Amino acid sequence: MKSTIHIINQFANTPDLPGHTRQFEIAKFLCYKGWNVNVYASDFNLTQRSFTKLKNNEFLKKELINKINWIWLRVFPYKKNNWKRYINIFSFCIILLIILPISIFFKKIKGEKGIILASSPQLPAAFLSLILAKIFNMKFVLEVRDLWPQIFIDKEKYSKNNFFIIFLQKIESILYKRSDYIIVLAKGVVDYVKNKGARNVSWLPNGPSLNEFKYYPLPKENKVFNTERPFRIIYAGSHGEVNDLENVIEAAKILRTLPIQFIFLGDGPKKNSLIKESKALDNVIFLNPVSKFDMPSYIGSADAVLVSLQDLKLFKYGVSPNKLYDAYAIGRPIISSIGGCINNEIIKYKIGVCADPGSPEELSKAIKKLFLTSRLERENMSRRARLLSEKIYSREKINIKYNNLLKEILNSKK
């Protein structure tokens, strides 16, 4: 008899939608390996800030996608990260609390063994999932994508004595201590969760399918200062406060006399203000978000990929950016203004240039350095990036490890 895994991630997406598709890729592989897989996600797309699947009178919709039972749930919509965002989170929890126990109950009647796997940063939904796992005597796995509430503390948006922070820290502590297993996406988070009481922890990072994100040779060379084809730098991802894209715009202003083009692909709450800020810049282009299917061709058309985050302590050890590993797979030199582990990896493997976060002057110097780097050396960076993705960040390898780990968890006596 097949075993069932219930995957809960409010922000999970299918490849036809913009945003991360980690849960889809894992679920697809687990189905191939014989699991019954149910994925519970919000129909309100985080990147587009709009509903994509549900009609006005629908509260849920089930789709069979690559043998995955994908359950889209209606939530309260929001546009900005204000009080409506918290209603959005708790509305997902309410509907999940109705739907998930029913699904588990019928699986139990059939005698199926199962696991509940919940993914952060949605801690309230993960906490409810943990409770249901204990009620139904199921194994519970927590996947730590983003560290809530640590990011709010690091940003000094809330004090440690704030009720909201205390509430989330209590939930976080219980989840770490009571989960049967914890999977982290960023290697630096292993020590963080262990220090907060986690017992069994594994690092299974983000990473693209190397069959879909194939190696792309660098675009045809343009001679230095030949403006027929500018040196293209692409940023692909969220346009939010933590991404600090204002820093990139300032660097673009410094470099406006060089044939360097900045392409911002994606969406987010800061996009409109960024467009206004760069209105006078002819070296900056904004594009709408695209699906995962289309992402390889966009990245492949660029000379380099840029990753950017604010100067927060958390980001020095606790991030695992999807687009960074997509760029590795396609073979693009990296321009990073993240700091910490990310910059250290780029420097160690000689696959790009780095700047400290929050410094447009340093970032502009790093970009100019890469722009003036010989094509031969940039091609070497490209090949080294691809080799790194094959060695560490291959989705195929990560999925195999994921499946083996879940089988061990399911069959363990504790």
Image (cartoon, grey):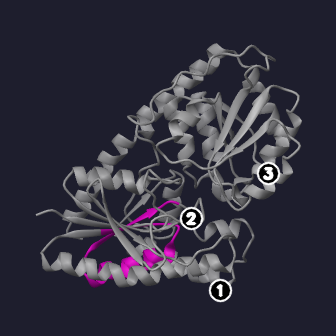
Q: Secondary structure at mark 1?
A: helix
- Location of the C terminus by quadrant is bottom left
Q: Amino acid at mark 1?
A: Phe
Alpha carbon separation for disc pair 3 and 2: 30 Å
* Front disc: 3 or 1: 3
Mark 3 and mark 1 lie on one chain; the one further toward the N terminus is 1
Q: Secondary structure at mark 2?
A: loop
Mark 1 lies on residue: 163
Alpha carbon separation for disc pair 2 and 1: 18 Å
Q: Amino acid at mark 3?
A: Ile
Of residues 207 and 411, the one nearer the viewer is 207
Q: Decide if residue 67 is in sight here.
A: yes
Q: Is residue 267 above or below residue 58?
A: above
Mark 2 lies on residue: 147
Q: Secondary structure at mark 3?
A: helix
Q: Is residue 383 above or below residue 199?
A: above
Magenta residues (range): 116-145
Mark 3 surroundings within 10 Å by alpha-carbon count, few (fewer than 14), some (14 through 19), many (20 or more): some
What label sits on residue 276 in the rendered view?
Answer: none
Of residues 171 and 333, the one nearer the viewer is 333
Q: Amino acid at mark 2?
A: Leu
Rendered image quadrant of residue 265: top right
In the rendered image, the residue lying farthest to the front is 56
Please tell me which residue is depicted at 67% across the width and 80% down the height of the picture: 83
Alpha carbon separation for disc pair 3 and 1: 36 Å
Q: Is residue 141 covered in magenta?
A: yes
Mark 3 lies on residue: 275
Mark 1 surroundings within 10 Å by alpha-carbon count, few (fewer than 14), some (14 through 19), many (20 or more): few
